[in-house]
Image: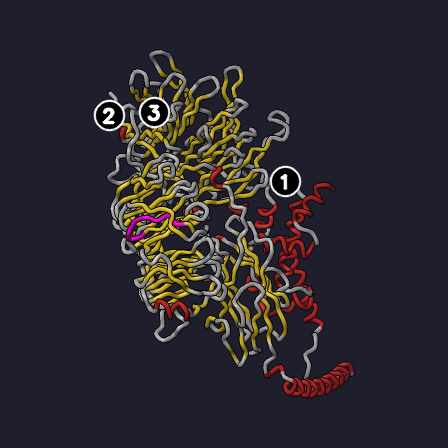
Amino acid sequence: MIKKAFNFFLFAFFPLFLQGQDYKFHHFTTVEGLPHNEVRKIAKDSTGFFWFGTQNGLSRYDGYKFKTYKHSSGDENTIAGDKIISLAASANHLWVGTLSGLSAIDTKTYKVKPLPKVTQKIGSAAIWMLFVDSNNNTWLSTEKGNYIIDNESLEIKEVLPEYNLACIGKGLKSILWIGTDKGMLKYDLNLRSVLNKYEMGSFSVFSLDDIYSDSDGATWATLNNNIFRYQPERDRFLNVYTSGSLNTISQFKESILFGSYGNGLVEYNKSTGEFATLRADPTDQFSISSNDIYQVFADNDNYVWVGTQEGLDYYDFSRHRFKSLRHLPGNSNSLRNNFVQSIYQDEENVFWIGTRSGIDRVLFYKGYIDSKVEHFVLEGAIFEELNNAYVTDIHKDTTEKMWFATLDEGLFSYDLKTNLLRRFVPNENDGLSIPSISVRSIMEDAKGRLWLGTGEGISLIHKNESTVSFENFQFPESEKDSTIIGDVFSIFQDSKKRIWVGHNNGGVGLLQEKNGEHSFKRFRHDSSNPKSLSNDAVFVIFEDSKQRIWFGTSENGLNLLMEPNGLEKDPLFFKRYTEADGLSDNEVNGLLEDKTGNLWIATNKGLSKFNVLEETFTNYVTYDGVSKGKFRKNACWKTKDGMLFFGGTSGINYFDPDNLEDSLMAPSPVFTSLSIDGNEIEVGEEMDNTVVLSQPLRKGAEIRLSGDENRFDLAFSALSYTSPLRNQYAYKLEGHDEEWKYVTGENPHVSYAKLTPGSYRFYLKTSNNYGVWSKEPIHLDFIVKASFYNSKLVKVGVFVLLAIAAFLAILVYLKTRKNKRLIKSGIKPRKKVVKTVDPEMDQENKNLVGRLNEEMQKNHMYLDPNLNLGQLAEKLDISANHLSMLLNDYVEKNFYDFINYYRVEEVKRRLANSSYDNQTILSIGVDCGFNSKSAFNRIFKNITGKTPSQYKNEVSRN
């Protein structure tokens, strides 16, 4: 009988403790460039740089690297101290509070700015609190008192001397909420007066208490172990939660996050009104680094930064929009096994999950944030085969029976009404038994019949009230088009009531029924026919909302069934999509369609979103939050509300495709550093008596280089922290580069050397990781001065040398003419001065050129994208230098122009041939030897004057 620990379909209550948002943190420590692992404070300046205050210096982060600011004794151009205890950003400054005093960093020059008036007033007092108000003035709390610094004049004056200020939060309009040693103050910034005082305890800078107003105007405060929320209707603060040593507050989307010292992160969900706790887990690489938290900083652009005792944690929402359900050791509310082979959702929204060690049932709630897992277990040793089976497919039929296909335990049926379980295995003495113990797939057709894909072909189940029999289809191998051999991995009925069968190395079979008889038409891969199936291992079959049939293969990508005029009038053929077209991997394991018609393809390397109309792929991998490991064949499901589920060797990934919309916000690039010979150049620095950079390294800045020091490296950033490694940059040095050049976020810098004297303008554009480019490029102006070698004296000397060389050349020319006359008269010159062309050698070279062209036309060596000069010379049995001479003197092309000419001609031939219509233009280019999209388009247009697409449209019209 079934073990009924609880009724899964009727929950009497939900758990009080919730998992909350599925945060996955990435970590930065001293290994990645932080000066210290203890990160106390976090701020973001007006340009977009992030700043992190540690116990051994201050770090600026641009998305790629950290730049550290430290104190140097006796140097007023360095920060006041290395132990950072407060940070705040105003319009023009980053204010840095240390145990040794206050510093200001000018956010135009990023240099430390001396503060003589401030220093005179407060000396080297510790700066416990910093806050910038709506007037852009800076508040600070020290052991000597409380002060306000005017942002323009940097004048400092005392404020609220009767209190010790611990924290300040912005309220509605001109209201400030100020936590003091004597309670909470409601302060009007315009009136410069205290409106009310709330006796709720003593705020302290040492306990890191905090005040925050969220997007709805609600005011929150942490005080010791308590969270308070302001009730405006009763003008009071209400204690709403108690935990250990609470401090920092920030809002991320619909959640309020609270840090604590010793108890991790506390999250309040504004939608549900519930609290959840996120704690450090040594077994989870994506958990927070430490339960000792100093600051939480949630940015509007999908980021959460957490400063902890053990380093800096960073959560990027865009990289973790894929939720996961997996096995967690010791947690009964998790999958029994991470290896998920099948997914099925019944009409009561319960998911049945088939793993390689049995079945789980899962119910999601709270908008798929939380889930309840039940391990489906049958009591008694007789049922152990199913309890631990490798479950390959699950289906519920119209009679309320669940059917479970297994890899090596046969087929099971389970009656939900009577709790009766039956098992079906092969019986040699029964011709109506199931043909194989290995069952791969179950399909219910439009007539309510169940079909099975097994290790021995397909089987049709016949049921009555008491018996179940199997009609097994065998076809003689002599029938060439009707043979079914090997495993059947998928069986599918389309909207035209056709039944398709996918085989392991047997291609696709189309089941045809006529007058009660069954036959199969088989489609196989044919290496000589590009319109044939791309591979014979077909594991996935899917029909989209436009009634298009797709076949996923194990080794060569995706196939679209093409039906020009219907089955009866015109033969079927296939159009292929592979890695060459942008698919993440050629092994297709699952197919689903989202609400907007995009296909989602599970592969061994992640998920690919395929825009069918534009024929473009967007790939998502572990960097984006997709689980590690490969997805399993046909382990996928789409819910009624559009959620997509994919199972694999690391559990289940599920997501709402609507939440994966690409960002249309174009980033604004900045220049981050200029280096010469590896040394970063600061504003005002001189080289060879020339000020290289006289103003901040911002757009429009002018850089002066001498003729000897015109080797430089320029680094830049998009200041886009959403998957910054996927940002792209386009640059061009006007006066030097003819075309735009590109680098990725993995290496965002460029280097130039040996520029000739003159003026240059460097242009830079950037895109976010979704390919949205900045509208206008920014620029820098470079002026390269003439060096000594370009002086007038040197130029005169060079002129004299050139004149002498020209005189000598004339003498050689006259001598050569004399020798030629001697040769014509039959007199051999005594000494050969100039090499002449031997007629026999000339003819031999012409013959070699003929062989070269013949080699290209017959053996198509140009199709090899890695072909080089040496390989081609070896084919002709000559040296590489000899071949280079032939190409230059007889063909008047260099090696690459020669090879690319043949490649372009081959592309033109294929674009004009309708047999290649099932291939994309890019894949044709790749097949013809081009190894990148940009090179293909550029070279094709240079030779033909048209882009490949324009050429294709032109030949199609003709």
Q: Give the range drawn in magenta.
A: 180-187
Circle 3 sits in a helix, a strand or a loop, which is it? strand
Instruction: Give the image's coloring scheme.
Output: secondary structure
Between residues 834 and 30, which one lies in front from this camera angle? Answer: 30
Q: Looking at the image, is 538 positioned above or below residue 103? A: above
Q: Where is residue 199 in the image (x, y as percent from the top left)?
A: 29, 45
Instruction: Tell me the kind of residue under disc 1.
Output: Ser
On the image, numbered disc 1 is attached to which residue?
Answer: 915
Which x, y percent locates residue 789?
A: 60, 83
* Dominant secondary-structure state across the stretch colored magenta: strand
Reading the image, the residue beneath label 3 is: 411
Within the image, what quadrant is residue 867 found in?
Answer: bottom right
Question: Residue 159: image x %, image y %?
Answer: 37, 58
Quadrant location of the C terminus in the rendered image: top right
Residue 5 - label:
2
375 relative position to 593: left or right:
left
The amino acid marked with disc number 3 is: Leu
Q: Where residue 481 sits in the image (x, y, percent)?
A: 53, 29
Q: Distance between the residues labelled 2 and 1?
A: 62 Å
Residue type at numbered disc 2? Ala
Ranked by sequence position, the earlier of labels 1 and 3 is 3
Residue 530 forms part of the magenta stretch: no
Q: What distance separates the C-alpha of mark 2 from that of mark 3?
A: 25 Å
Taking the image as shown, residue 907 lies to the left or right of residue 381, namely: right
Q: How crowded is mark 3: few (under 14 residues within 10 Å), some or many (20 or more)?
A: many
**CB-based contact (under 8 Å), mark 2 and mark 3:** no
Circle 1 Cα neighbour tier, 10 Å, few/some/many (<14 / 14–19 / ≥20): few
Instruction: Mark 2: give few (<14), some (14-19) or many (20+) Cα within 10 Å.
Output: few
From this viewpoint, which residue is outermost toward the left? 381
Instruction: Look at the numbered discs 1 and 3 and tell me whether their residues touch, using CB distance below 8 Å.
Output: no
